[in-house]
Image (spheres, rainbow, N blue to C red):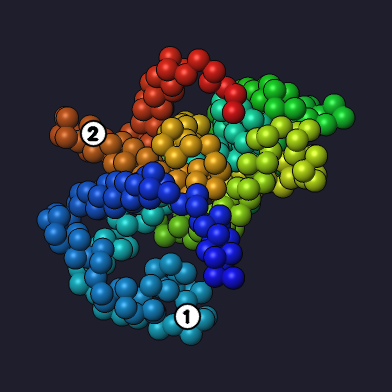
């Protein structure tokens, strides 16, 4: 009996190998270090160790009412019975109120985009698939721009409109690709077509924006930026993330079966179209949540699964866990570069949108992959 139990446990946790542990540890270290450096800089000067003390201040971590006020907001925290009046040191208040939300939003955006890209690559059985390639990011971005430019009174519903836009775009892609069923090639081709049309419609919307502030906000959305985010954006993206993360990990074994091919998956008892559609819905939710708070940040959903796959292999149980750590690391580090590169080079307080940095990093890395792997594009 004891031997059988050990065999079962071995099969269940055998995929948790050393390469995955090293990947997760490296991703966590990069995220924490980049986040601490990011928090270090601002109008109020602090030393690195003051930042460390403020981030890990026990006056925050061991007082549930303080954490609830930051994460839930004073209104909801008060409604749940938490006391929202408290005193904190100046450095802790600055770090937690002003600087830390940007790091948290960046980490959550990176996580969602990485998981979304990994799911789409398995569903389409194509390494070139991503929320951007399949039109989901473009659909969410178009819905966000339409809300900002035409329906400005509904700006508070941006997460909802982004999710709606991404969903409608993917449904259109699915309908175009459907011919008694779908195929990975048709899905990608339909996604490229729909994404191109939606990008043109995004550009056209700029002609209807008369307010300069609206145009600047719209440009920030289309390039992907974390400038000015606060706890409100953390509260927007956190609930969908809490659904996406366990859903992606639990759906990993179905993704592994999908990679075997439609006929094999059907022979194993899987209802292929239903599984493909439900897993795609999960990826849409992840991409839309990221677009809603940061705009269209390119390449993260495309390259992170590749980076993780080269280390931990193609087993989606390992891949999903690795993406959950590497995605945040890439985006937080990219945002650090976007914020501080020009400041250190020129002394001027100029910040780039993080989407520009991920494009500059992701493009050459993807070209490197294309040169190295002859069969890139097939899983």
Q: Quadrant of residue 209?
A: top right
Label 2 neighbour load within 10 Å: few <14, some 14-19, many 20+: some
- Nearest the eye: 165 or 32: 32
Q: Which residue is label 2 attached to? A: 341
Foreground residue among 155 and 83: 83
Q: Which residue is mark 1?
A: 78
Residues 347 and 217: in front is: 347
Relative image position of residue 273 (x, y in whole percent): 79, 40
Q: In this view of the protein, can residue 135 be seen by the observer?
A: no
Give coordinates of residue 301: x percent, y percent.
51, 36
> For the residue labelled by badge 2, is the local secondary structure a helix, a strand or a loop?
helix
Report the quarter where the C terminus lies: top right
Give the distance between the C-alpha atoms of the residues marked 1 and 2, in whole angstroms: 41 Å
At numbered mark 1, what does the secondary structure look like: helix, strand or loop? helix
Looking at the rendered image, the quarter that the N terminus falls into is bottom right
Residue 41 at least partly seen: yes
Image position of 147 (left or right of 100): right
Identify the residue at horizontal 38%, vertical 48% (top origin): 18
Of mark 1 and mark 2, the one earlier in the sequence is 1
| Cβ atoms at labels 1 and 2 below 8 Å apart | no
Q: Nearer the viewer, residue 212 or 57?
A: 57
From what the image shows, is residue 168 above or below residue 45? above
Instruction: Give the image location of residue 7, x and y in percent.
Output: 55, 59
């Amino acid at each position: 009996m004891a031997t059988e139990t050990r065999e079962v446990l071995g099969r269940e946790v055998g995929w948790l190998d050393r390469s995955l542990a090293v990947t997760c540890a490296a991703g966590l270290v990069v995220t924490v270090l980049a986040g601490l450096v990011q928090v270090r800089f601002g109008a109020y000067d602090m030393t690195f160790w003051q930042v460390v003390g403020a981030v890990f201040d026990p006056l925050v971590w061991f007082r549930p009412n303080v954490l609830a006020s930051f994460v839930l907001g004073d209104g909801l925290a008060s409604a749940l019975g938490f006391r929202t009046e408290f005193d904190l040191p100046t450095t802790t208040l600055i770090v937690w109120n002003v600087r830390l939300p940007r790091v948290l939003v960046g980490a959550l955006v990176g996580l969602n985009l990485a998981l979304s890209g990994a799911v789409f690559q398995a569903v389409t059985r194509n390494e070139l698939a991503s929320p951007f390639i399949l039109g989901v990011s473009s659909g969410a971005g178009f819905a966000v721009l339409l809300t900002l430019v035409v329906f400005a009174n509904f700006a508070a519903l941006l997460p909802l409109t982004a999710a709606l836009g991404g969903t409608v775009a993917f449904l259109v892609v699915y309908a175009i690709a459907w011919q008694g069923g779908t195929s990975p090639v048709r899905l990608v081709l339909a996604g490229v077509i729909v994404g191109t049309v939606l990008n043109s419609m995004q550009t056209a919307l700029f002609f209807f924006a008369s307010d300069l502030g609206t145009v600047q906000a719209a440009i920030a959305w289309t390039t992907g930026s974390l400038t000015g985010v606060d706890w409100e954006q953390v509260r927007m993206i956190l609930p969908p993330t809490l659904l996406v993360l366990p859903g992606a990990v639990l759906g990993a074994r179905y993704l592994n079966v999908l990679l075997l091919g439609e006929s094999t998956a059907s022979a194993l008892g899987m209802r292929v179209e239903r599984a493909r559609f439900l897993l795609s819905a999960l990826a849409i939710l992840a991409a839309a949540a990221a677009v809603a708070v940061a705009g269209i940040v390119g390449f993260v959903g495309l390259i992170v699964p590749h980076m993780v796959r080269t280390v931990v292999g193609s087993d989606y149980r390992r891949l999903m866990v690795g993406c959950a750590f590497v995605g945040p690391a890439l985006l937080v580090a990219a945002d650090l570069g976007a914020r501080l590169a020009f400041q250190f080079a020129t002394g001027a307080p100029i910040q780039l949108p993080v989407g520009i940095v991920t494009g500059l990093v992701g493009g050459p890395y993807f070209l490197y992959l294309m040169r190295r792997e002859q069969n890139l594009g097939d899983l």
